[in-house]
Amino acid sequence: MTHWQDDASRDLMSLGGRLALLTRGEGSAVWDDEGARYLDFLGGIAVNCLGHAHPVFVDAVSRQAATLSHVSNYFASPGQLELAARLKRLAGTGEQGRVFLANSGAEANETAIKLARLHGNRSGRTTILVVEGAFHGRTMGTLSLTPKAAYRDPFQPALPDVRTVARSTDALEAAFDGTVAAMIVEPIQGEAGVVPMPDGFLATARELTRAHDALLILDEVQTGSGRTGEWFAFQGAGVEPDAVTLAKSIGGGFPLGAMITFGAASDLFYPGTHNSTFGGNPLASAVANAVLGHIEDADLLANVRARGTELRAGVESLPLVSGTRGAGLLIGITLSAPVAGEVRAAAQERGLIVNAPTEDVIRIAPAYTIGDAEVAEFLTLFGAALSAVAASTPTTTDPEEQK
Ligand SMILES: Cc1ncc(COP(=O)(O)O)c(C=O)c1O
């Protein structure tokens, strides 16, 4: 019998990753093919908001699969209508809001790019502004909005007229002119290392987009669906966008994405301009309704806020930790040395899954359901991983620096 890594190298596209062969999950734990247990504090990259195999998720998938899974976009289904109404209510769009259901974050953002084109093409505006460090996806359109050269350069030519703006209100003010059709922003940049936009940035972006007849599109693929302790990060910032995109936690592990529009932006698409075979199918819609409904019923957003505060306080005193940032249960733990890769590996060796989006940041995005036991186990395992790396990191051998 070949080892699973040999099978993966032979049969799967060579794209990196694949740190273990995971075979089972329950709550905040997953197990690999050899029976080793891991505390999952990455949650499938901010996806498994109810943890693994949650009864609400299992029940929704099972019931809907046994009732009606797929009907194509020629037809509506009750779950799809319920989900659209729910998302409008949670986002506070009022009557005028509209929802497009898709299958992933990139597809939701592709939809937002088309929205920007429909808006800009009415007056010949083609520029889309993006923020330095942004990540909006890997499809050609969303990749064009992702400034990181290593991701984008092999696939040039990208979409034209995309301009990158620094994360400052001064840079924003300088960037707007009569060519701008839209600006797309992540309220907190997850892939860049959990980097929140500076104070006032979103409000300034809102003012400038309004003044220049441009759309403000918020990419809440990572921050939305309750991850920050609010349903949407924009609600915490007090800024209403023209459109917001979602994916990740919205389906709790079932592939699903969405774009929600506000106000006049809701009238831009018209029949024939967009669609998706699988988007908003009955199965995905039923799961999202069940997951979002459970977050509301169990008041899990209060838990997201409380556990986020607890975790941030708990890691502050650990070796190598220089600070924390983010909101709710999307937390970036900054390190005093560029050893995040080593810390991630040391954590996995000890039975803890976290990730290292940059060389000096560890990201955690655990389930909204975590309690005292998960927080305590995380702090023990993470502390042990940090101590092991600190002991072997020359730059931090000074006990003063190690804290
Ligand atoms: C902010 C943001 N936008 C878009 C995406 C792309 O989502 P997907 O991988 O579902 O296509 C991601 C994925 O990490 C993301 O974090």
Image: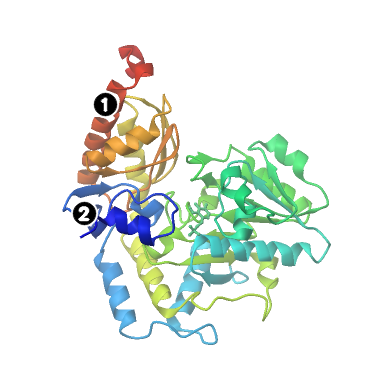
Estimate how packed mark 2 is, as few (under 14), some (14 to 19) or many (20 or more) residues with alpha carbons within 10 Å. Answer: some
**Would you say the beta carbon of the disc 2 residue lies within 8 angstroms of ligand 1?**
no
Reading the image, the residue beneath label 2 is 31
> Where, quadrant-wise, is the N terminus in this rendering?
bottom left
Q: Position of residue 374 (x, y in %)?
A: 23, 45
Task: Answer with the quarter of the image where residue 143 lies.
Answer: bottom right
Q: Residue at x 22, y 35 (%)?
A: 380
Q: Residue at x 50, y 73 (%)?
A: 85
Task: Answer with the quarter of the image where residue 11 lies.
Answer: bottom left
Is tag 2's residue or tag 1's residue first in the polypeptide sequence? Answer: 2
User: 256 or 88, which is in the foreground?
Assistant: 256
User: 114 or 250, which is in the foreground?
Assistant: 114
| Tag 1: amino acid | Ser
> Where, quadrant-wise, is the C terminus in this rendering?
top left
| Tag 2: amino acid | Trp
Estimate how packed mark 1 is, as few (under 14), some (14 to 19) or many (20 or more) residues with alpha carbons within 10 Å. Answer: some
Reading the image, the residue beneath label 1 is 387
Q: Secondary structure at mark 1?
A: helix
User: 269 or 85, which is in the foreground?
Assistant: 269
Q: Is residue 306 left or right of residue 360?
A: left
For marks 2 and 1, give the CA distance.
Answer: 24 Å
Q: Residue at x 36, y 49 (%)?
A: 304
Q: Position of residue 336 (x, y in %)?
A: 41, 24
Q: Position of residue 388 (x, y in %)?
A: 26, 27
Residue 36's place in the image compared with 102, above or below, is: above
Residue 238's place in the image compared with 98, above or below, is: above
Residue 74's place in the image compared with 211, above or below, is: below
Residue 22's place in the image compared with 68, above or below, is: above
Q: Position of residue 222 (x, y in %)?
A: 47, 53
